[in-house]
């Protein structure tokens, strides 16, 4: 294998793919990237056996070949070289030599035959969608995914394919986030898949890199996303996602419209004196006002009064302040609507003008 490539041309696909590689590996070859130079194309593949990402770029190849190279060492070398450097790479006797300017590096390699790759995904359903819209929907919901929950199906995001588009749903059992993306999908029945947390994180990064439509292919055990010259593949979580629609409060007709940034700043201040363990704050609604109150075991108190026009006569309900902060922080609009039913029911949070994204926060008994 022998080829030359500009530093900046190599850095883009290399930076994309290295994100998949875990720092601690059970197999030495998983710390490497599969590098294939063939037919005028350099193709880089990284995997952790759950998620695989392939990125490619066109270039003139002097000698074709394939091998695996230590991922992070290669990236660090490329980043350390000066801008505009031409990197000459050549493979001989299981050693990869990189030359750039006055620098020379020799890296150990492992055979390409040892590298595990995911086979072609047998496509059952396929959808094309605008990457910006999908990225926004994921950003509006990803924070609500569980982390290392014994209910393994919560440690990921539900992607629900419907006739009118894609719905992203995440929950950790205490809060729920839903965001919808409009798309025309030819599908007979609604299809649900659960993408693991690692896959969602890498998918977010990938969606930053292009403006053209992204193709999502769904198989029995995998989902594959194609965007330009990048191909992302993730295993799916085999489990049944909870009936999330039953969690959305019905009859929540007590509406409070409030400035999103003003409410978020008030919560940030009140959170300073909240209980460190339970992070509880109380929303007290009286005519013309919303009062936020926080206490802690040291008998300290924080009170925030917001002037808000609403029709609620008298209501007090507690929440985990972090959950409300996350929900408000993920929204974009200037004004948000809080919907309540009673002091024992969840709060439904959405933008006043756009309801494609909704958040449900369960009450906290204070």
Image (cartoon, rainbow, N blue to C red):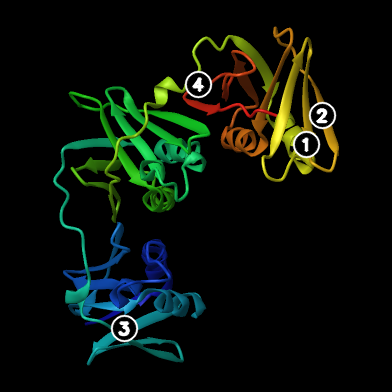
The residues bearing labels 2 and 3 have C-alpha atoms spaced at a distance of: 62 Å
Sequence-wise first label, 2 or 3:
3
Q: Which residue in the protein does label 3 denote?
A: 89
Sequence-wise first label, 4 or 1:
1
Sequence-wise first label, 4 or 2:
2
Q: What residue lies at 49% left-to-right and 75% top-to-bottom?
A: 79
Circle on res. 146: none
Contact check, label 2 and label 1, Cβ < 8 Å: yes
Q: Which residue in the protein does label 1 denote?
A: 270
Label 3 crowd (10 A; few <14 / some 14-19 / many >=20): some
Callout 3 secondary element: strand
Front tag of 4 and 1:
1
Front tag of 2 and 3:
2
Relative to 269, 27 lies left or right: left
Front tag of 4 and 2:
2
Q: Which residue in the protein does label 4 denote?
A: 355
Q: What residue lies at 56% left-to-right and 12% top-to-bottom?
A: 252
Please tell me in which quadrant of the rendered image residue 255 appears: top right
Callout 1 secondary element: helix
Contact check, label 3 and label 1, Cβ < 8 Å: no
């Amino acid at each position: 294998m022998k080829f030359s490539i500009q530093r900046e041309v190599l850095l883009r696909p290399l930076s994309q793919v290295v994100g998949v590689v875990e720092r601690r590996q059970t197999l030495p070859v998983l710390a490497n990237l599969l590098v294939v130079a063939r037919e005028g194309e350099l193709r880089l593949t990284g995997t952790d056996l759950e998620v695989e990402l392939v990125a490619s770029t066109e270039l003139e190849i002097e000698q074709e070949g394939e091998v695996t190279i230590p991922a992070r060492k290669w990236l660090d070398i490329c980043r350390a070289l000066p801008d505009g450097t031409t990197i000459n790479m050549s493979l001989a006797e299981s050693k990869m030599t990189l030359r750039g300017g006055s620098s020379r590096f020799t890296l150990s390699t492992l055979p390409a035959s040892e590298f595990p790759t995911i086979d072609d995904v047998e496509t059952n359903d396929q959808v094309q969608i605008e990457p910006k819209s999908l990225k926004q929907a994921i950003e509006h919901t990803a924070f609500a995914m569980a982390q290392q929950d014994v209910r393994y199906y919560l440690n990921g995001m539900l992607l629900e394919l419907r006739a009118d588009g894609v719905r992203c749903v995440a929950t950790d059992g205490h809060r729920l986030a839903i965001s919808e993306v409009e798309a025309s999908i030819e599908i007979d029945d609604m299809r649900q898949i659960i993408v693991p947390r690692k896959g969602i994180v890498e998918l977010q990064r990938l969606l930053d890199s292009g403006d053209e439509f992204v193709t999502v292919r769904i198989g029995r055990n995998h989902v594959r996303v194609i965007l330009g010259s990048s191909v992302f593949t993730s295993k799916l979580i085999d489990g049944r996602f909870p009936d999330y629609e039953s969690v959305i409060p019905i009859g929540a007709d007590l509406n409070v419209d409030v400035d999103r940034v003003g409410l978020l700043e008030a919560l940030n201040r009140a959170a300073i004196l909240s209980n460190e363990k339970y992070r509880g704050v109380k929303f007290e609604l009286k005519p013309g006002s919303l009062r936020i109150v926080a206490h802690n075991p040291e008998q300290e108190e924080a009170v925030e009064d917001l002037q808000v026009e609403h029709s609620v006569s008298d209501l007090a309900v507690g929440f985990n302040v972090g959950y409300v902060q996350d929900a408000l922080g993920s929204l974009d609009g200037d004004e948000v609507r809080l919907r309540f039913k009673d002091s024992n029911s969840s709060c439904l949070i959405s933008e006043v003008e756009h309801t494609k994204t909704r958040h449900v926060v369960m009450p906290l008994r204070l």
